Amino acid sequence: IVGAVALMATMIGFSDIGSATAEETVRVCSGEPGLNYTGLVGEIKKAIEADSPIVTIENIETLGSRESAERYNAGECDAFMSQPEAASETDATAAFEAWPEYTHMLCNTELVDGADSMSELIDLDKVVQVGGAPTGSGSRDTLDFWATNYPDDYGEHNFKFMDIAPEQAIGLMLKGTLPCTFFVSGLRPDYMSVLNTPAAAEKITMINFDNYNLDNAEGYNDEQIDSGVYGELNGWSDLDSVRVSSSFYIRPNLDTTKPIAYLVLSNLGGQVAAKYRE
């Protein structure tokens, strides 16, 4: 452990650890409690603090990418987890990719007249209420990006976005009081576990993103989710989705303001993220 810190101190030109720095704390705005962003930052914290006792990682929970980016801009964080849209409004640089995330739209089949694709939802002669992407979350950023750039498809005449978290939205959808739930996440997030029943599969439809085209927008790509991922819930069929790359972003001057922390993050952060994805 001490050897790793000493090596890094030597790399940045200090003769010994004591002269390099006393302690360095990196404040990381992560995401919602109990979800992937906070989980990954927690694993990074454990790995770095075990390797380098003079470095402390402070895991600051937020509503998601949007709030994390805003708090970074306000000077409350040195680094943050984010999807690309929120991060584009900061001066931060991506240190490493956290993992791919995917768009999920699930609907109560009866409340959307049997629609199973975005094209069919858009063609419904009614406004569809969608929960799961509260203000401040990266999921909401994605919806707002679509609504701004593709108003004919995602505008208020077709969809009403509700400030309801995914867990609540899924419960309301199962009860038949909310038509749809949208979120951007890794595959099989914990809050989808309540849908792992034959009864839920009969009631809920996973929506194909068959009309999607972002015209080369950075960080967004069409991609299919394999049929085995959601099995019966998606009728054992491949699902058309959109891949959204989430990354760990840092201040561009972190290498000079907190050099030991910067070096440890650069060396260990990506390794921890790769292991966390397994």
Image: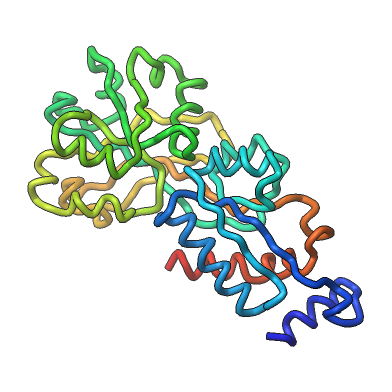
Q: Could you tell me which residue is drawn at 89 percent across and 76 percent down?
A: 19
Q: Could you tell me which residue is drawn at 78 percent across and 62 percent down?
A: 258
Q: Is residue 224 left or right of residue 275?
A: left
Q: Does 191 appear above or below 159?
A: below
Name the spot of residue 23 as percent of width and height, x first: 75, 70
Name the spot of residue 270 as percent of width and height, x first: 60, 65
Q: Quadrant of the N terminus?
A: bottom right
Q: Quadrant of the C terminus?
A: bottom left
> Looking at the image, which is closer to me, 234 or 72?
72
The quadrant where residue 53 appears? bottom right
Name the spot of residue 210 as percent of width and height, x first: 33, 32
Q: Is residue 163 left or right of residue 149?
A: left
Q: Residue furthest front?
A: 22
Q: Does 196 appear above or below 203?
A: below
> Looking at the image, which is closer to me, 100 or 53?
53
Q: Is residue 135 left or right of residue 95?
A: left
Colour pattern: rainbow
The quadrant where residue 26 appears? bottom right
Q: Does 125 appear above or below 261?
A: above
Q: Is residue 89 left or right of residue 46?
A: right
Q: Could you tell me which residue is drawn at 23 percent across and 54 percent down?
A: 193
Q: Could you tell me which residue is drawn at 9 percent across and 50 percent down?
A: 198
Q: How many numbered discs?
A: 0
Name the spot of residue 237 as percent of width and height, x first: 22, 47
